[in-house]
Image (cartoon, rainbow, N blue to C red):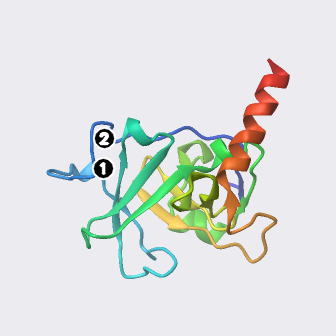
Amino acid sequence: MSTSIDFATSSLMEIGSRSHCVVKQVNPENVFRFPDGIIGFSDIGEYIFLVNEKVAPFMFMQALDQSGLSFVCVETFLLKSDYSIRLPESYIRLLQLDDPADCLLISLVTVNTDIRKFTANLMSPVILNMKKSLGCQFVPEASIYPVRFNIWDGLEKLRKNQVRAG
């Protein structure tokens, strides 16, 4: 295994597409453990991911330890198809990664009453090992990506590029 992983593609994870963020029963295989938590919530170690088709492509990262704690998130590559990070060996060990294809990168979203002002944290993505149900937030020493990437602008740019290519 190399000492770093360079992410180029990923696919969307779906655990419960019929949920309205009301969790009645959680199967153990749907619980993602975060050994170090995430920024600002280092004491919260277990999350599930809820997908509601009405708000796609957004999903919810729901804490199990605190029912009132939930984060809106989106698959990082949906916003920036050329997104690329190098994951250091310490994160590879933490996530017990055997294959980069086992990962999903998501970005936490800051919502606003105006949808055109939604932003995503591209600087510090959440990385999920889909096979081992482990997660962490990757905080690089330096990043070319912003903490507040405007989602609307990113989606518009991707749409225009698709129109040109097609």
How far across and down, in percent of the image, does residue 131 sit?
Answer: 43, 46
Residue depicted at 74% across the width and 50% down the height = 83
Q: Are marks 1 and 2 in contact (CB under 8 Å)?
A: yes
Disc nearest the viewer among 1 and 2: 2
Residue depicted at 55% across the width and 66% down the height = 93
Q: Quadrant of the N terminus?
A: bottom right
Q: Quickly name the residue at label 2.
A: 16
How far across and down, in percent of the image, does residue 107 sit?
Answer: 58, 58
Which quarter of the picture shows residue 120?
Answer: bottom right
Q: Quadrant of the C terminus?
A: top right
Location of residue 164 with respect to 94 vertically, above or below: above
How far across and down, in percent of the image, does residue 85 sit?
Answer: 73, 58
Which quarter of the picture shows residue 149?
Answer: bottom right
Residue depicted at 59% across the width and 62% down the height = 92
Q: Is residue 44 left or right of residue 145?
A: left
Q: Which residue type does callout 1 highlight? A: Asn
Q: Quickly name the residue at label 1.
A: 30
Residue depicted at 53% across the width and 62% down the height = 112
How far across and down, in percent of the image, does residue 123 sit?
Answer: 69, 67
